[in-house]
Image: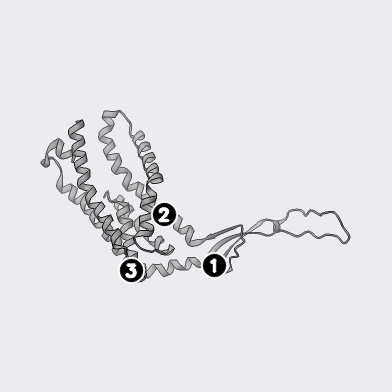
Amino acid sequence: GAGIMAAGASGVAWLGIARKVALPLALSPILSLAVMLALSPLLAPVLRRFHRFCVCLERREAVPAVPAGATASVSASVNASDLPSVGVLSGSACPPDMLVRVNALDSLHWVSSGATSFFRGLNDTPKVLALGFAASAVWGVGLGGFYAAVAVAMALGSAFGGFRVTETLARKVTKMSPDEGLLANLTTSALVSAASLWALPVSTTHVSSGAIIGIGAASKAAGIQWKTVREMLLAWIVTLPVAALVAALAFRLLA
């Protein structure tokens, strides 16, 4: 939108936009959906086995021997049996009164979520920084300042507005089991990281949405909430021309 206002329609590299921007954005959610359809029946049963294991931290206290006839309490010296012990047990053998009980699949899911967040930053942050390059000469802000500003803005946006998006993806598209969510995170991380290595801008939300829709398509029991999917697709389509119009208007008023 700003480019058309500044240099006319002929001043915009439409072929480059189509090949380097529009095509990756359009194909990435379709590709993630296809990957989930192919991998979910194969890997989901394997990942589901991690439900059987947990890491437990148990405190075993030594019981001091009390001499016969003693009335005062006797304190025992600390030895190895007083210290917590760690064990990897099957899910059914994990007592509920452990000091710490960590499900192996939950831990892997947190790691995969962190990987998805990292690769989102790897691909999404440069998009915003690209706009900062053009403004840096006017505002006199160095590149380090823009990195800090973008990081703070993304963190605040995720903290204050991201939970609604999370709610939509996690619960309103299809029902997911923990192992399916883990597989969707791994698929999203792999595709977004590959796109970053090839300098292709994609939307992490689009890729993740495609993977989640793939989960619903692969599961006959879960199903897909098509009303939510239609609303998401409509938002993806509408925001592009609206952003162009807002940018064109801003350029006309401010330039």
Asked if 161 appears above or below 44 in the picture, the reply is above
Q: Earlier in the sequence, mark 2 or mark 1?
A: 1
Between marks 3 and 1, how big is the CA–CA gap?
27 Å
Check disc 3 and report the residue beneath it. Answer: 218
Report the front residue among 131 and 168: 168
Question: Of helix, strand and loop, which one carries label 1?
Answer: helix
Check disc 1 and report the residue beneath it. Answer: 91
Check disc 2 and report the residue beneath it. Answer: 113
Which image quadrant: the C terminus? top left
Residue type (three-letter) at the residue carrying disc 1: Gly
Q: Is residue 158 left or right of residue 199?
A: right
Q: Is residue 186 visible?
A: no
| Residue 57, label in figure | none
CB atoms at circles 3 and 2 under 8 Å apart?
A: no
Q: Residue at image x 37%, y 60%?
A: 184
Residue 209 lies in quadrant: bottom left
Asked if 245 appears above or below 142 in the picture, the reply is below
Which image quadrant: the N terminus? top left
Q: Position of residue 90 (x, y in %)?
A: 55, 68
Q: Residue at image x 37%, y 48%?
A: 162
